[in-house]
Amino acid sequence: NCEYSCEFNLSDNIKYMGVSMVYNGNGPGAPNLYGVFHLPSGLKEINGQVFCGLGSNGSFTGDIDIPQGVAEIGDEAFVISFKNRVNLSLPAGVKRIGKGAFGGKIRFNSLHFNNDLQVIEKEAFYCCNMPFQIKLPEELVIIGERSFYACGIEGEIIIPEGCLDIGSNAFAGNDLTRLTLPSKLEYIKDEAF
């Protein structure tokens, strides 16, 4: 329970962090944490809500560097506040990004997916700010509802050939200029674009 302002610093030896790692008495989170955001290099699991509610009003600096060996990013894992725009690059092996994983507070400078990524769950990047063109990974099968809703994405979106399902409002509220859909696509839900 972190009631006072304190610096957030994790050892590289940590391999596992439980759900809602920081709890403030009223639920997950600790709005008074601050510092350079750093994930332990030995981390193997990023569980749901593990960093949910950390910091407020731009408490953190740095980028989100997902360590090698992580296979999925849990639901609402990174609902945190950064001072500046951040870079996110997913290493090989990450196959799933959970529901609301980046939860709408993050302003991205860049976002790079690995080609192993298969599932982007609903609201994974909901209302995050990413005013640039994104390249979706080749192995992507499912794009959940509102996964990139109102992110400010600009330009062309090419949905990979293996994608079967695009959820409702998945890309709604963006500045798309061109859309390329795959021949094997089975489902395009309501107002996807």
Image: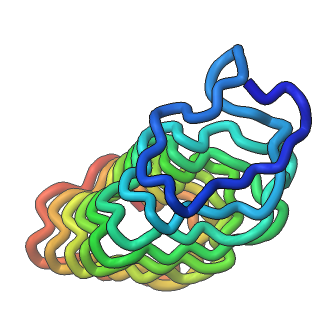
Q: Residue at x 55, y 71 (%)?
A: 65
Q: Residue at x 81, y 43 (%)?
A: 33
Left or right: 80 as drawn, with respect to 144: right
> Would residue 114 be seen by someone viewing this image from the given angle?
yes
Give coordinates of residue 137: x percent, y percent: 31, 78
| Quadrant in the rendering for residue 68 | bottom left
**Front residue (pair 106, 48):** 48
Left or right: 124 as drawn, with respect to 3: left
**Front residue (pair 158, 41):** 41
| Quadrant in the rendering for residue 158 | bottom left
Colouring mode (rainbow / by chain / secondary structure / one colour): rainbow
Q: Is residue 49 above or below residue 154?
A: above
Give coordinates of residue 126: x percent, y percent: 54, 51
Q: Residue at x 63, y 76 (%)?
A: 87
Q: Is residue 26 above or below residue 94?
A: above
Left or right: 165 as drawn, with respect to 69: left
Q: Residue at x 19, y 68 (%)?
A: 163
For the N terminus, give its image quadrant: top right
Residue furthest toward the front? Answer: 13
Tag count in the figure? 0
Give coordinates of residue 17: x percent, y percent: 47, 43
